[in-house]
Image (cartoon, coloured by chain):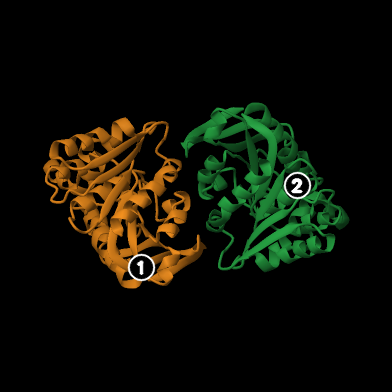
Chain colours: A green, B orange
Amino acid sequence: MELLSNTKSFGGWLKRYRHESLSVRGEMTFAIYLPPQAETQKVPVLYWLSGLTCTDENFMQKAGAFRKAAELGLAIVCPDTSPRGTDYPGEHESYDFGSGAGFYVNAEVAPYSNTYHMYDYVVQELPHLVETHFPVTDQRAISGHSMGGHGALICALKNPGKYQSVSAFAPITNPTQCPWGEKAFAGYLGEDRKAWKEWDATCLIEKAEERLPLFIDQGEADNFLVEQLKPEAIEAACESAGHPITLRRQPGYDHSYFFIASFIDEHLEFHSKALS
Amino acid sequence: MELLSNTKSFGGWLKRYRHESLSVRGEMTFAIYLPPQAETQKVPVLYWLSGLTCTDENFMQKAGAFRKAAELGLAIVCPDTSPRGTDYPGEHESYDFGSGAGFYVNAEVAPYSNTYHMYDYVVQELPHLVETHFPVTDQRAISGHSMGGHGALICALKNPGKYQSVSAFAPITNPTQCPWGEKAFAGYLGEDRKAWKEWDATCLIEKAEERLPLFIDQGEADNFLVEQLKPEAIEAACESAGHPITLRRQPGYDHSYFFIASFIDEHLEFHSKALS
């Protein structure tokens, strides 16, 4: 692992690393915020999955999360949103497919199947790396925004026991039924729509082995609410399956980090309770 | 004034405007954060002056200031760091001169003397505009970072009674004696170094008519500390003149917004006390 930067904030340290990833067969960059408590004890980790177009930096710069993380003694890890080392035809042309848009799945369609294994990276490789190299416990929480909010939901739903808590901001809840998801899943997973259901949070609720409560904040002034995010889909699936969900519709808030910043403290407190 | 965006955050609203400025003879963009209290009463205003290369957006996105501003009932106004509508020879070539680097002075050297009147804009035109169009009182505080930290200091020192409080993060304290300042002052003010002293915070301390306390945070791991910022210069001037100053050297912190975010709450509380 190569340390790219090391910046003090709220008494803790934000560190960015580049490393060779086995999952994506190339270099990946991630960031970790270590709260001051990590100097003398192991701390639990919140994994944050960002949305379309983001890198490891957006959340760290814009969410205003470090104050509360430093208070709670919580580390935060932000991976990138896709592999970056390739140049497949069209890979860098759309904001919603290819680079910056890995959707936290394992791609099965060539050439993306060679490297776009963001699910394996986020669920297996990155926690292993983090738990090997940093003063952290094996207590994990996961959260994210938009594409990353959905990523957090499927990582938790597909891995009972792996995460102590899950939350999301404005997640795509039902990607098999919205334009962003249909484009990404067709491109990464192929044309068999039945297979897509293994990667759709709303479809996974019905057979979830663990009743891990979902905590979701959604802005009511979010431009993507009706066409792409569809919180009513996962809400109905949870109701039907008896899966616990807290879905808060926040009047006036949009899809931006100004919305995330407004409620991140409550999410960190929610996770900290589950992790302690 | 043209409203460019309107975004809810922490119960208040971040609004960006474009308007025709008389001071700079062209369009300017600024941002205002109105806390929730502004819906029912007038609130005081903190003016934030950003550093080299910034626009009105950096502080608003990265400082994490809205949570505390919403709690205290404080509006925050961020102007841009220079006029943007011109294309003088070399204006856009350096990060430390011309666009993005107005230094909050009134330029006297052509062609900059035609439009680079950032001091008049920040001290006169912008407060007048803000106090005319928004639910704010005439209670004002001023703060900023680096070039903008120096801007805040000179605005306060040159205008007794105009601001109730002043603070700065990692300010250039003595621009007549550092490379950034020498380049900017030569380019904007001309070769008469005596005239520069009217725009140098450290030089202004000696004849300050008002003993407004200076509150400064400076990171000890700041790359620009020794060559450009020189807090010891203003500290010595304050000691010599009996001007009140609180200069905190923060171990381990650099020049970034991660440093500002770590201490912005304390600055907002400092200003709020002076404004109430």
Tags 1 and 2 touching, CB below 8 Å: no
Left/right of residue B18 with respect to residue B202 in the rendered view: right
Give above or below for B56 relative to A142: below
Q: Please give the name of the residue rendered at 42% of the width and 51% of the height, measured from the top-left corner.
A: B59
Q: Residue A156 has which mark?
A: 2
Left or right, residue B101 beside residue A180: left
Residue B228 vs residue A129, the one in the foreground: A129
Q: Chain of mark 2?
A: A
Q: Is residue A129 left or right of residue A75?
A: right
Q: x and y percent of residue B32 in the render? A: 40, 62
Q: Secondary structure at mark 1?
A: strand
Residue A68's x, y, as percent? 53, 45
Quarter of the image with the N terminus of chain A is top right
Label 1 – label 2 distance at C-alpha: 48 Å
> Percent x, y for residue B74?
38, 60
* Quadrant of the rendering where the C terminus of chain A is positioned: top right
